[in-house]
Image: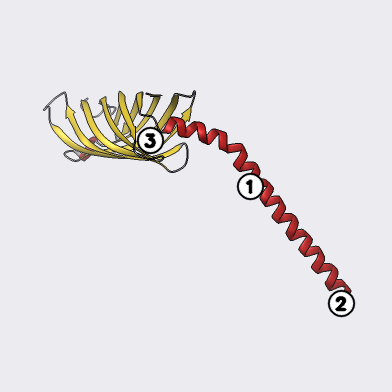
Amino acid sequence: MNNFVILTKSTTTTSNMMKKATLLLAAIVIFTFKPAKAQENHYAYKSKIGIGIETDFAENTLGYGFSLQFQCPLTTHLNLTATTSRISLNSTLKVMPKRDYKYIPLKLGARYFIISQIYLAGEIGVAIETTRDKKTSFLWSPGIGSEFMVSEKSALDIGLRYESFMADPNKSFLGLRLAFNYGL
């Protein structure tokens, strides 16, 4: 019986120590990240303009380009986006005739920050071909990315997206974009 009382006191003491350690850890996390969160929110509430370079990968095709993106915040986590770019896709297979496609995509979309630096994005728009047939194609583009603050008004933006052309799915690609965003 005495052993049971000692075991109960020991378990209660261990449980209280765990509760205190958890509360202490929670307080440290809250007070450590609060100033950084305030700085991020200050940046997040501003409209931003981003200038980026990109590399695009498709089956048998390698592409490159540059882009310009405007972001306008709606809420703490949600930004509307307007993007234009210049993309060149070049055939990399030696057995096939060389094909080069150049596009100017015009897209509208949204960027939702699931946590302070990580976002999910979605855009729809048109791609205007500047070579060959000069066709215009509807496109859609889901993606994921991250913004890393480098100063109070600017951030590096790294994003990965899939871009699909409705008129010609063979020209769809996976794009990697590195951009510098500046808060206006």
Q: Is residue 105 above or below residue 16?
A: above
**In contact (CB < 8 Å): disc 1 and disc 2:** no
Circle 3 sits on which residue? 160
> In the rendered structure, which amino acid carries the disc numbered 3?
Leu
Q: Quick check: 124 left or right of 16?
A: left
Nearer-N-terminus badge (2/3)? 2
Q: Amino acid at mark 1?
A: Ala
Q: Is residue 114 above or below residue 62?
A: below
* Residue at which label 2 appears: 1
For marks 1 and 3, the one nearer the N-term is 1
Q: Which residue is mark 1?
A: 26
> How does the figure colour the protein chain or chains?
secondary structure
Query: In the image shown, does 181 or 63 lie closer to the viewer?
Result: 181
Q: Quadrant where the N terminus lies?
A: bottom right
Q: Quadrant of residue 171?
A: top left
Give the left or right position of residue 13, taking residue 162 as reference. Answer: right
Query: Tags 1 and 3 in contact by the CB under 8 Å rule?
Result: no
First in sequence: mark 1 vs mark 2? 2
Q: Residue furthest left?
A: 133
Residue 7 visible in the displayed image: yes
Q: Residue at x 45, y 38 (%)?
A: 118
Q: Position of residue 181 (x, y in %)?
A: 39, 25
Mark sitting on residue 16? none
